[in-house]
Image: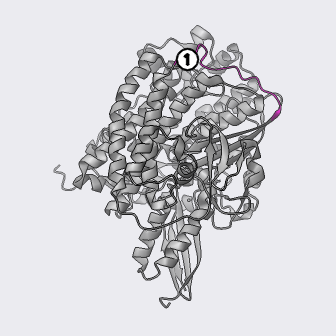
Amino acid sequence: MMRTRTPTLAVWKFASCDGCQLTLLDCEDELLTLAGQVQIAHFLEASSAVEPGPYDVSLVEGSITTPSDVERIRRVRAASTVLVTIGACATSGGIRALRNFGDVREFASVVYASPPYIESLATSTPIAAHVPVDFELRGCPIDKHQLLEVISAFLAGRKPDIPDTSVCTECKRSGVTCVMVAQGTACLGPVTHAGCGALCPAVGRGCYGCFGPMTGANLPAMIGRLRDCGMSTGAIGKVFATFNVAAPGFRLPLVQK
Amino acid sequence: MTDHDREVRIGSLARVEGEGALQVIIKDGRVQQANLQIYEPPRFFEAFLRGRQHTEVADITSRICGICPVAYQTSAWLAVEDACGIDVGAGIQALRRLLYCGEWISSHALHIYLLHIPDFLGYPDAISLSRDHRDVVERGLRLKKSGNAILEMVGGRAIHPVNPRVGGFHRAPTNSELAVLAEQLRHALDDALATVEFVANLDFPEANVAVELLAVHHPDHYAIESGRIRSAGGLDFSSADFPAHVVEHQVPHSTALHATFDGGRYLTGPLARYSINSSQLSPLAREAAAAAGLGPTCRNPFRSIVVRAVEVVYAIDEALRLIAAYVRPDMAAVSTPPRAGIGHGVSEAPRGLLYHRYQLDADGLILAAAIVPPTSQNQAAIEDDLLAAVSANLGLDDAALAHLCERTIRNYDPCISCATHFLDLTVHRQ
């Protein structure tokens, strides 16, 4: 089919740190080339020019935490042909999903003197809990090479080549010595979704799970190994209770606790 | 609605980090209110930090801001190490300063080229600017990349670095790794000097911020990653005394708390840092500042772009100095056994002073946390500046007035994501 117009790309922000949309601007070598291939039609952090929808591809950062955002994400979905969530917040609720296991009113009272001014839901939920999502890109933050692959794939009308394997596979491929086997360092690599390039083991640190759970992660076996590395039940609960705390694949330690 | 009574509204501010709106109310030809409405959703970091281990804090606070994670990590380490009574030593501190230089270069290059220059040259964004001036935007992207190269080499990742930790680093880089970085930075220094020359020739409206200025000050060098706190008025105090001088309070129109310094409005950030510490810049950065027409102080927010460009020169110059003097530490980190106590930490995030305080129990669990980001400290001063800008330009139509307000806000490089604990412009002409 002949392409008759330049495809449009939109970037949307919900509750987040801006790090994942910054990843697009961090593509210093590719940004201007990309801008030649697509029309960046809505990207408030980078441009005051806003084109009306519909948009061919929407990248959505952040989680849903306010009543007005519940409505806004539906409008974004309606205006988008393809909707891709970028990062741990949009994909699992992010670190602020810790509120899902606490009392948000009490949280508000700790931070704000007049909590009634604050409009906030009791939960922080992923985009997929509200609208259909076409692809979820993992990471806290996402990896820029994976982002470019996802954008290129959807513009070409093909499936993104993002392997759903563990960080261990990347670690082995890059020739890093296993920190758990060699040093007894607790590492979430065996259960964590690949994509970062095994950054933590490369500096001698155990993976802390910022890309969230891989599909079919064997959590009971992982927990056994973490105990062997000297971690207490409390510490194991905490290590899973970070940026992907509400991801179903990382929920078991909380239940056991 | 007469011309004397009007309301100007900017629904969603663009080219700022995070989300906010602005509402200006004009009644009887006088500006009554200029409210920065921060509707970035509240994230409650200080609440859910309670009960976390002291060694986890920096990885969590990093997630407050993807633009300046090193600032959030640094102020956290400083506060936790202060509570535990730990001194990391000169070698680790120098490596932290090098890492922080990377964040200044990357964040400043982002603001100068992608967020701020389009305002001066009349473009909606850097992409459309690149169609007419590709060389300018490419220079900005190269500069930004050089800052990220430091963050990746020393920090392990540009956004939310993984290598730093309380007590130091997981792994100290080798001299040969830093030698490669130094080569890239020598080229970046040429781009940084060209940037100062370029922004110095932009057209600057007259403006003057009259409020107090506050910045971190270090006796030995231009303060970045540590130091005491100094005001333009001459006060000098330690981070532990920050709560005695700075009080945060909530306003109904914002999810970011406002702060006052000794009861008054004040400003942190590039103008404050430069005005308080400019004599400590490196000779090369001082020379570039003088050639760009900057005196020893600068209170024109439009010229903050020149100050940021000078700070990029300094950060690259300083990074090169740190690399030349680098001796790989024997231990990448010192041990950080916890103890009960309260610790304070301040550092200079690219957009201003960032304060953290933690109370730890004997096991190192966080009992209480307080984080005061630069943008919440600057909110009141920005509103002051908006009030002055609108009052002086009431003759403009709503679209032109809204544009002026947006420019006024972007001068401060507000980071709304950080402050929420920011922009949409509404001007009411009633």
- Element carrying mark 1: loop
Left or right for A221, reference B11: right
Position of the C terminus of chain A by quadrant? top right
Question: Relative to the observer, which residue lies in front, B299 or B185?
Answer: B299
B64 shown above or below A79: above
Task: Characterize the local packing of mark 1: few (<14), some (14-19) or many (20 or more) Cα atoms within 10 angstroms.
Answer: some
Can residue A253 be seen? Answer: no
B65 shown above or below B17: above
Residue A251 coordinates in the image, percent (x, y): 65, 34
Task: Give the residue type at disc 1.
Answer: Gly
Question: In the image, is residue B339 part of the stretch drawn in magenta?
Answer: yes
Residue B427 coordinates in the image, percent (x, y): 51, 76
Residue B232 coordinates in the image, percent (x, y): 63, 54
Question: In the image, is residue B201 part of the stretch drawn in magenta?
Answer: no
B135 shown above or below B162: below
Range of residues picked out in magenta: B327-341
Question: Relative to the observer, which residue lies in front, A104 or B139?
Answer: B139
